[in-house]
Amino acid sequence: MPHTRPEAGCYEIDFETAYPLDEGAEVALEDYARALTRANSAEAVRAGDDPATVRGVHVCGLGVPLTPALLRDLEDFARSLLTGTGGGLGWS
């Protein structure tokens, strides 16, 4: 599911802001995105101009529609990984 070659049923969810996330936070974001959207797969998308930041999530095989509330929730979670309120890998 490489986001560089989009497939049918895949969507790129862009954040309003790119977030500097370490590897553990990136994995937590991918897990959260997969659970929140009931997707078959999710991959954090790094910013092209700053590979140390995540600018969104690429998801495939969604189980729910993408709504403004869901998108807000996903970005709020990414933001919380910066401040430590998201619980890292313990969110579930």
Image (cartoon, rainbow, N blue to C red):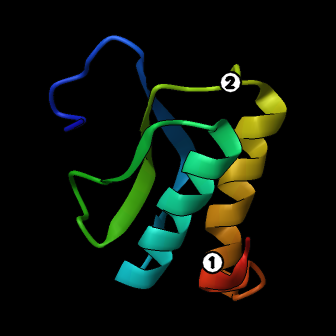
Quadrant of the image containing the N terminus:
top left
Q: Earlier in the sequence, mark 2 or mark 1?
A: 2
Q: Nearer the viewer, residue 52 or 86?
A: 86
The image shows residue 8 at horizontal and vertical percentages of 33, 11
Q: Can you see residue 85? A: yes
Tag 2: Cα neighbours inside 10 Å, few (<14), some, or many (≥20)?
Answer: few
Q: In percent of the image, x 37 and y 67: which residue is there?
A: 53
Give residue 73's position: percent from left, percent from top. 77, 49
Mark nearest the camera among 2 and 1 is 2
Task: Answer above or below: position of 45 versus 22.
Answer: above
Q: Of the residues shown, which amino acid type is indicated by label 1?
A: Leu
| Residue at 44% from the left image edge and 76% from the top image edge | 21
- Give the residue displayed 43% in from the left and 46% down from the top: 42
Residue at mark 2? 66
Seen from this angle, which residue lies furthest right?
69
Q: Which quadrant does the C terminus fall into?
A: bottom right
Q: Is residue 2 left or right of residue 82?
A: left
Asked which secondary structure carries label 2, the reply is loop
18 vs 60: above or below: below
User: Which of the 4 image quarters holds residue 15?
Assistant: top right
Classify 1 as above or below 45: above
Spatial CA distance of label 2 from label 1 is 22 Å
Quadrant assignment, res 6: top left
Of the pair 30 and 57, the residue shown nearer to us? 30
In the rendered view, tell whether residue 49 sits above or below residue 90.
Answer: above
Find residue 81 and report its image quarter. bottom right
Is 44 left, or right, of 1 in this rendering? right
Question: From this viewpoint, is residue 20 visible?
Answer: no
Q: Amino acid at mark 2?
A: Leu
Q: Which residue is mark 1?
A: 81
